[in-house]
């Protein structure tokens, strides 16, 4: 098994996906392919743990004449030790937190595909049901609920669907062969595929994916010391929260930056059921144990999460870091009941036409006193009037808006509009607001603009040092912001325009006079030559 670059595995799988997708919608195919990759990860992880527990008791795999495994070691062990399997599974549930019986492991499923078995579809359906309902705990409940193996998109009847799955799984198995199966490799490949599928999904991409460079900015900001960013990253975060977590990439980016063990627990919420399942798979595939994360399915704006609806402030959850890329200017239905909601009642309800401030206030409500929140929003939140102006004004007067970062246009798959990052804190040391106008610093691309590492580093360094730089950044006192009626339009405070050279009219007049004089002298000299030649002079 060769140790190949992690991105290379993602590229191999994406090439296979591109070849196999055919007439199937990219979003539909995404769900199938990522689920099969997840099954491969669960299987490899389980078999590796079983090998550690059983040691020399585990027999070798049975191979065919071509050297291809037709029966996994664990499959053989189950057949040879029928009376010990129950105790073995109890041990695995305790140590690994889940069990997969041999007939549902990826190796067996891939073998059924290779041999064109008529039972592949049935076994795969049984495998998904088993993992959801019997493997272990809540982390798997409903995990494959949106993967319809009976869909006509796979074929009009059982035989056609079975044949299609044989092709898909067979090609994926061939692509995976020869690559390391650790969580880092498969996790990176999973993230790569999500990004590639997002690139082809247009507006739908915003439902599940935040481009990596923007994710890096948010994760680097919230992991710095909240009170004194110059002190560098925090040693530990008890909790991190994303209230519109999509596929979970933002949360995983924070975890990667903190290192394993650097975060007590990860929390996320997602309304879209398919994306919610994607996020849970993503967590598990990156080696996050089911006890280390809690992703909830529900509507964030309605606060459909029992743990967050606790009325006693002393018992409400508080998060050390909050990151989010909520849907931009989502239409919603603010009600009288929501007006009295603990998240909104001191600020007001975001307008029906744009729920941006509703998402912001939800995350801010659950931010811990020493925590940092970084949220991506459209520029309209910086200057729109009405109730949004009142919410913005209160946050500013209370000293909660720490930094405003303007980003370039066309960074997202789902929209070409420029966006901003708002950094909020409940307790901040400075009494000003830092503005970073990074809108002009990016690499232009035909399809999508990109932030390069040096652009990201400059944003983070400026935030850490709270640095002023001409046409890029400035810490603006509250008195100046109040003078602009709490409008946070970035160009009011940090303009990227280059000042025009000052023109002195007297100097211009003198230059024109000198030019006219040189013209007269040149004409007189030229006419003298013409006169010597007997030619008429120039007028």
Image (cartoon, rainbow, N blue to C red):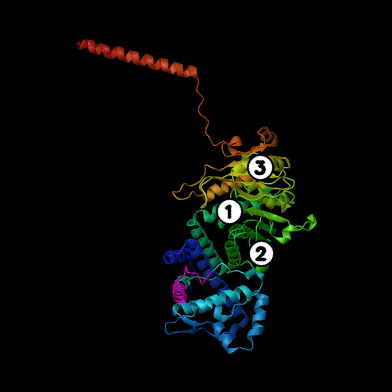
Is 516 drawn above or below residue 111 in the view shown?
above
SS at circle 1: helix
Mark 3 or mark 2, earlier in chain: 2
Distance between the alpha carbons at the discs numbered 1 and 2? 20 Å
Residue range (magenta) = 148-167
Dot 1 alpha-carbon crowd within 10 angstroms: few under 14, some 14 to 19, many 20 or more: some
Dot 3 alpha-carbon crowd within 10 angstroms: few under 14, some 14 to 19, many 20 or more: many
Residue at 69%, 52% (x, y): give it: 362
Q: Position of residue 56 (x, y in %)?
A: 59, 85
- The quadrant of the rendering that contains the C terminus is top left
Distance between the alpha carbons at the discs numbered 3 and 1? 28 Å
Number of the label disc, if any, that sits on residue 356: none
Number of the label disc, if any, that sits on residue 293: 2
Mark 1 or mark 2, earlier in chain: 1
SS at circle 2: strand
Q: Position of residue 308 (x, y in %)?
A: 72, 58
The residue that mark 3 highlights is 388
The residue that mark 1 highlights is 216
């Amino acid at each position: 098994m060769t140790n190949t670059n992690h991105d290379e595995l993602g590229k191999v799988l994406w090439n296979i996906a591109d070849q196999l997708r055919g007439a199937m919608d990219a979003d539909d195919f995404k769900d199938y392919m990522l689920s099969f990759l997840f099954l491969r990860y669960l299987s490899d992880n389980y078999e590796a743990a079983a090998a550690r527990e059983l040691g020399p008791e585990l027999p070798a795999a049975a191979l065919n004449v071509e050297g291809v495994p037709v029966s996994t070691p664990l499959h053989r062990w189950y057949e040879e030790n029928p009376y010990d399997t129950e105790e073995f599974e109890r041990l695995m549930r305790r140590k690994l937190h889940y069990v997969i019986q041999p007939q549902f492991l990826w190796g067996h499923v891939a073998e059924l595909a290779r041999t064109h078995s008529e039972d592949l579809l049935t076994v795969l359906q049984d495998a998904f049901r088993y993992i959801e309902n019997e493997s272990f705990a809540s982390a798997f409940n409903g995990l494959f609920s949106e993967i319809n193996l009976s869909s006509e998109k796979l074929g009009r009847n059982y035989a056609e669907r079975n044949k299609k799955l044989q092709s898909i799984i067979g090609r994926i198995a061939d692509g995976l062969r020869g690559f390391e199966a650790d969580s880092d490799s498969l996790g990176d490949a999973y993230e790569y595929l999500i990004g590639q599928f997002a690139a082809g999904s247009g507006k739908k991409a915003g439902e599940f994916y935040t481009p990596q460079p923007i994710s890096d900015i948010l994760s680097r900001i919230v992991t710095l010391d909240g009170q004194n960013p110059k002190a560098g990253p925090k040693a530990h975060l008890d909790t991190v929260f994303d209230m519109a977590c999509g596929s979970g990439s933002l949360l995983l980016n924070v975890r990667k930056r903190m290192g394993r063990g650097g975060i007590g627990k990860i929390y996320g919420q997602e309304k879209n059921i398919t994306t919610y399942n994607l996020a849970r798979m993503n967590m598990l595939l990156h080696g996050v144990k089911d006890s280390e994360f809690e992703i909830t399915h529900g509507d964030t704006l309605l606060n459909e999460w029992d743990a967050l609806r606790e009325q006693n402030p002393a018992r409400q959850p508080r998060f050390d870091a909050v990151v989010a890329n909520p849907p931009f200017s989502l239409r919603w239905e603010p009600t009288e009941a929501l007006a009295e909601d603990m998240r909104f009642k001191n600020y007001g309800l975001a307008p029906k036409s744009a729920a941006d401030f509703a998402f912001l206030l939800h995350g801010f409500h659950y931010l811990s006193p020493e925590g940092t929140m970084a949220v991506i929003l459209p520029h309209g939140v910086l200057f729109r009037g009405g109730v949004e102006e009142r919410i913005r004004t209160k946050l500013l007067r209370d000293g909660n808006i720490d930094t405003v970062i303007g980003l370039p246009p066309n960074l997202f798959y789902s929209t070409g509009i420029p966006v901003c990052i708002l950094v909020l804190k409940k307790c901040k040391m400075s009494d000003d607001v830092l503005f970073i106008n990074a809108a002009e610093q990016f690499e232009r691309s035909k399809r999508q603009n990109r932030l390069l590492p040096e652009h990201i580093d400059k944003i983070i360094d400026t935030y850490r040092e709270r640095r002023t730089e001409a046409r890029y950044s400035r810490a603006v006192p509250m008195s100046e912001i109040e003078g602009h009626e709490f409008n946070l339009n970035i160009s009011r405070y940090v303009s990227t325009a280059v000042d025009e050279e000052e023109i002195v009219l007297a100097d211009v007049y003198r230059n024109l006079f000198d030019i006219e004089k040189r013209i007269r002298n040149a004409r007189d000299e030229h006419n003298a030559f013409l006169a010597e030649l007997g030619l008429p002079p120039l007028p």
